[in-house]
Amino acid sequence: MYRTHTCGELRMRDAGKAVTLAGWVQRVRNFGGMLFLDIRDRYGITQLVFNPEHNAAASQLANELGREYVILAMGKVAERSNKNAQMPTGEIEIHVEHLEVLNASKTPPFTIEEETDGGDELRMNYRYLDLRRNNNQQNLLHRHQVARAVREYLDGQNFVDIETPHLIKSTPEGARDFVVPSRLNPGQFYALPQSPQTFKQLLMVAGYDRYYQIVRCFRDEDLRQDRQPEFTQIDCEMAFVRREDVLHMFEGMVKFVFKKVRGIELPDFPRMSYDDAIHDYGNDKPDLRFEMKFVHLKEGETNLVGERSFKPFDEAEMVAGICVNGCADYTRKHLDELTEFVKRPQLGATGLVYIRCLADGTFKSSVDKFYTAEDLKIIAAKFNAVPGDLLLILAGPAGRTGKALSELRLEMGNRLGLRRKEDYKPLWVLDFPLFEYDAEENRWNAMHHPFTSWRPEDEAFFESDPGKIKANAYDIVLNGVEIGGGSIRIHKRDRQEKMFTMLGLTKEEALQKFGFILNAFEFGAPPHGGIAFGFDRFCSMTIANQENIRDFIAFPKNNMGRDMMLDAPGTIDEKQKKELGLK
Ligand code: ASP
């Protein structure tokens, strides 16, 4: 055996055993001739001790080692006189009798510790060193555990893991395609799948009934912290299901994973319509770890703020606010900060109105000039405000104002510590609109994707008001992050054609792009539906409760879509270009 134990394994019960460990040098300390060396591997860290009086050669060699040298040490497990309760192996040490250097190491450009001194870019360049750090190793091990739990659950439910191709024709998920030139078909290109959407539907036509795949998807989008050009989905599809069946199956999966991997029992997931989510939280993925719902002061017949000559309210389509408990004593400075926050160009609010609910039952607001004490009382009552509360109100066009208020709500949640790390609040959001209008292009787009079916009762809106049609689509949201989404699909050719027509495709275009699936729908396509989870994000949310998916991907790309270590993408030579018909 190369090694008898790992560096995280030995305990008091092993005292006296002769062992062989292999790993990396974490650090070496010299105490008056005695050398203490921490040896590290994936499993942990163990202290090695070298005593020059007992073993001069090994001690001499140990003295010459630098950080990250790979070594093999043989010796005896002994009880430590100076125990370290912080370390699982902290009760023992190895008295080394024989030491070998398996490989030397240059001094690493940053420390291989949880709190490293290396910046982002440097660590991306040396990702293999970054991946040696314990936090990264824990993240990837977590990812592995989540994948295992997902498979265990789905296998148990008769799902079949089937691979689908990566060199395909475009699948429309609303992003740009990455394309691959075809050498054998000069001038022609494959697209990399944005998702296996059409294939999983074809598998339902083929009778596989329950499919899943943990699969790489590719989308050429502008990148953000939580996006990667290639990412992984848990992609699933089921035949002979209604929405309820799908929700039930995948709520079960999320619960199973939490229980299995984290030991956390999640209660049944609440459900909310898209319209309610937008109305109450200004957002189709509300963070339900805290309440702070929107209160609308001006909508429909209601207008609690009208006709007081306060222009921003008089002219606004929407006036709404949130009630922040216990913040009536916010200082001018705090309020200025919040005003700046909502006025940032990304949010674009024109200003922020506040009302402080004072201890004596009176109010102090930024609109005292326009609203009487009685007005403010009526408004505060609408918020169910009590003394000590701070009301924050925004006004303007509905879409933008809702979005800005949503961000303000999240910001207040952060400030008040209401978005707790160990709190998990999942949610189903249902009844999304089928279409969203693209004003620039002057046409309707599918909000989910063009294979999503709609509520039969909304059929008439196709002629009168397509914006009103509700899709048979659902999203699963966890703590304000969308972790998955899916729909019940169209499974009849004429319905699918109707959809393509709405999206502005001519009959010829529809046939050229999607003839294969239109044809398949004529050969006994069963009713079907499914869902896909963003696996990287699911991993990050199930442990860190944070969206930084990069930490859960072994070799991620940076914000420019570059692999820093490989220096990809790169150019190709002329010969290769020619072969590919690119020149
Ligand atoms: N293919 C969809 C997506 O990638 C998920 C689904 O509808 O199942 O978002």
Image (cartoon, rainbow, N blue to C red):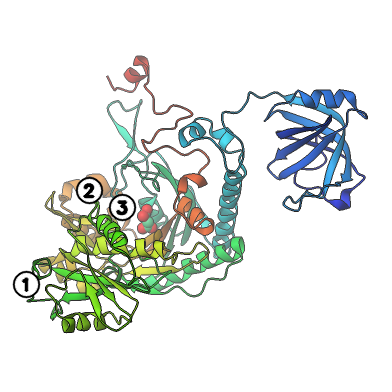
- Give percent across and percent down for residue 76: 89, 40
Mark 3 residue crowding within 10 angstroms, few (<14) / some (14–19) / many (20+): many
Q: Toward which corner of the image does residue 457 lie, by quadrant?
A: bottom left
Which badge, 3 or 2, comes first in the chain's sequence? 2
Residue at x 66% of width, y 25% of height = 105
Marks 1 and 2 sit apart, C-alpha to C-alpha, by 58 Å
Q: Residue at x 46, y 71 (%)?
A: 248
For badge 2, the amino acid type reads Leu
- Give the CA separation, mark 3 to mark 2: 9 Å
For the point 62% across and 44% down, the residue is 134
Residue bearing mark 3: 517
Return the disc, 3 or 1, that comes first in the chain's sequence. Answer: 1
Quadrant where the N terminus lies? top right
Badge number at residue 296: none
Please state which of residues 238 and 538 is positioned toward the viewer in this rendering: 538
Query: Residue 495's spot in the image, x, y percent?
Result: 23, 62
In this view of the protein, which residue sits in the foreground, 112 or 254?
112
Q: Amino acid at mark 3?
A: Ile
Instruction: Using the image, determine if residue 355 lies above or below residue 82.
Output: below
**Res. 113 visible in picture:** yes
**In the foreground, 125 or 472:** 125
Q: Which residue is mark 2?
A: 511
Give amino acid for label 1. Ser
Disc 2 on helix, strand or loop? helix
Q: Nearer the viewer, residue 156 or 284?
A: 284
